[in-house]
């Protein structure tokens, strides 16, 4: 019912693509990250929040039909519906049903609640296409509560010494998750323009965010001393960051689980905070779906599908052009590190 083509995941009965990476006639977009929401298509279908974010990022001319979670839409006898993926605000899994056969394409997803996204909803299907960005047993996330305790301790310590705390986080999703999770009594939250833009769109969509300030050239230097600055990694090596000196740098990402990655990114502190499912979350999702067949995309596909086969599942790997969380950040022009899209198997 769904096939993998050079343009993306395709439903031939409906002539619809899911997150195509080339221009097509009709595209369903799972979420507004740039490796999934691409321009050049004639008609898009997405959740209302994804629609608003796509307009903000890609222009107002896009022809996007908004469809809420769980609202079915039938194209050529194929029934499509979108269900919460818990990845970022507006993110969705795609449920596809034709003559009693059900497929689900997860898009990016996570099982932890993040305080900003509609939580993941398990969906039953015959065939599950799952991402597996972190599909190795070494990836097991701590409770977000614990990660935020570490993050607050770092910020509090810096603030006590008049050192600005600068955290690199993807401007859509991770930045708002960090803002929402930290202890705001420590100091002000200041954000880069890229983060400010996303904050504004999400607030217009009804998301409640704590007080934040957009950093401008008029922001007084003293304002940075006890502040938490949230920025895409790309801005850290530019003169934009000079005024914040002295500062301590950190990054919030699932890749921070790999120590070498933090060093390569030249970041002082790494917080393991991911918007993707960890190993247990992936396996839990496969089980809950009840799927007879699993297709792994996006990440450690070979190893993950191999593992599923070793425990008796019918599983295969497919290649896609999605680059993953940190990869998406690199597209924003982050610091000069190798894209960790498909890292070699770590020895640990
Ligand atoms: Zn994503
Ligand atoms: Zn992705």
Image: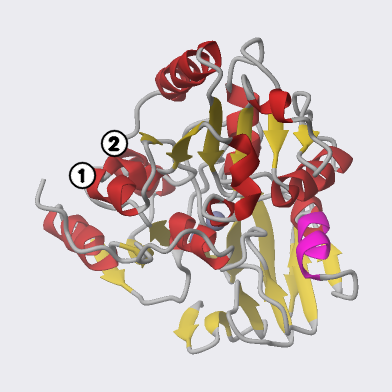
**Where 101 falls versus 47 (above or below)?**
below
Q: Nearer the viewer, residue 199 or 337?
A: 337
The residue singled out by tag 1 in the image is 137
State the mark number for residue 338: none
Residue stretch rendered in magenta on the structure: 52-58
Residue 215 appearing in the image: yes
Q: Position of residue 208 (x, y in %)?
A: 79, 28
Q: Secondary structure at mark 2?
A: loop
Q: Position of residue 85 (x, y in %)?
A: 57, 47
Q: Is mark 1 within 8 Å of ligand 2?
A: no
Q: Secondary structure at mark 1?
A: loop
The residue singled out by tag 2 in the image is 140
Q: Nearer the viewer, residue 317 or 286?
A: 317
Measure the C-alpha gap from mark 2 to mark 1: 7 Å
- Residue at 60% x, 72% y is 18
- Residue at 55% x, 64% y is 333
**Would residue 122 be found to the left or right of residue 316 on screen?**
right
**Where 80 falls versus 163 (above or below)?**
below
Q: Nearer the viewer, residue 152 or 58?
A: 152
Label 2 CA crowd tier, 10 Å (few <14, some 14–19, many 20+) = some
Q: Nearer the viewer, residue 295 or 268?
A: 268
Q: Are marks 2 and 1 in contact (CB under 8 Å)?
A: yes
Where, by quadrant of the figure, is residue 258 drawn? Answer: top left
**Where 225 falls versus 292 (above or below)?**
above
Quarter of the displayed picture in which ligand 1 can be seen: bottom right
């Amino acid at each position: 019912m769904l096939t993998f083509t050079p343009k993306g995941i395709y439903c031939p009965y409906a002539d619809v693509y899911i997150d195509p990476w080339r221009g097509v006639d009709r595209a369903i977009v799972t979420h507004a990250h740039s490796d999934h929401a691409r321009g050049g298509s004639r008609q898009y279908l997405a959740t209302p929040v994804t629609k608003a974010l796509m307009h903000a990022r890609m222009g107002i001319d896009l022809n996007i039909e908004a469809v809420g979670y769980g609202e079915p839409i039938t194209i050529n006898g194929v029934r499509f519906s979108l269900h919460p993926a818990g990845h970022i605000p507006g993110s969705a899994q795609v449920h596809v049903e034709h003559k009693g056969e059900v497929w689900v394409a997860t898009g990016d997803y996570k099982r932890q609640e993040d305080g900003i996204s509609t939580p993941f909803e398990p969906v039953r299907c015959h065939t599950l296409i799952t991402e597996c960005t972190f599909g190795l047993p070494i990836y097991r996330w701590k409770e977000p509560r614990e990660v935020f305790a570490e993050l607050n301790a770092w910020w509090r310590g810096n603030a006590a010494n008049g050192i600005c705390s600068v955290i690199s986080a993807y401007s859509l999703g991770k930045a708002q998750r960090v803002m929402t999770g930290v202890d705001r009594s420590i100091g002000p939250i200041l954000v880069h323009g890229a983060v400010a833009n996303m904050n504004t769109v999400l607030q217009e969509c009804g998301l409640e965010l704590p007080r934040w300030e957009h950093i401008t050239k008029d922001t007084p230097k003293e304002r940075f001393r006890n502040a938490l600055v949230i920025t895409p990694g790309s801005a850290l090596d530019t003169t934009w960051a000079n005024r914040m000196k002295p500062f301590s740098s950190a990054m919030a990402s699932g890749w921070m689980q790999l120590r070498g990655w933090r060093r390569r990114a030249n970041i002082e502190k790494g917080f393991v905070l991911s918007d993707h499912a960890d190993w247990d979350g992936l396996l839990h999702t496969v089980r809950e779906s009840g799927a007879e067949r699993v297709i792994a995309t996006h990440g450690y596909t070979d190893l993950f599908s191999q593992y599923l086969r070793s425990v008796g599942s019918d599983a295969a790997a497919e290649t896609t052009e999605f680059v993953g969380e940190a990869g998406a950040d690199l597209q924003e022009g982050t610091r000069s590190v190798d894209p960790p899209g498909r890292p070699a198997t770590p020895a640990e």
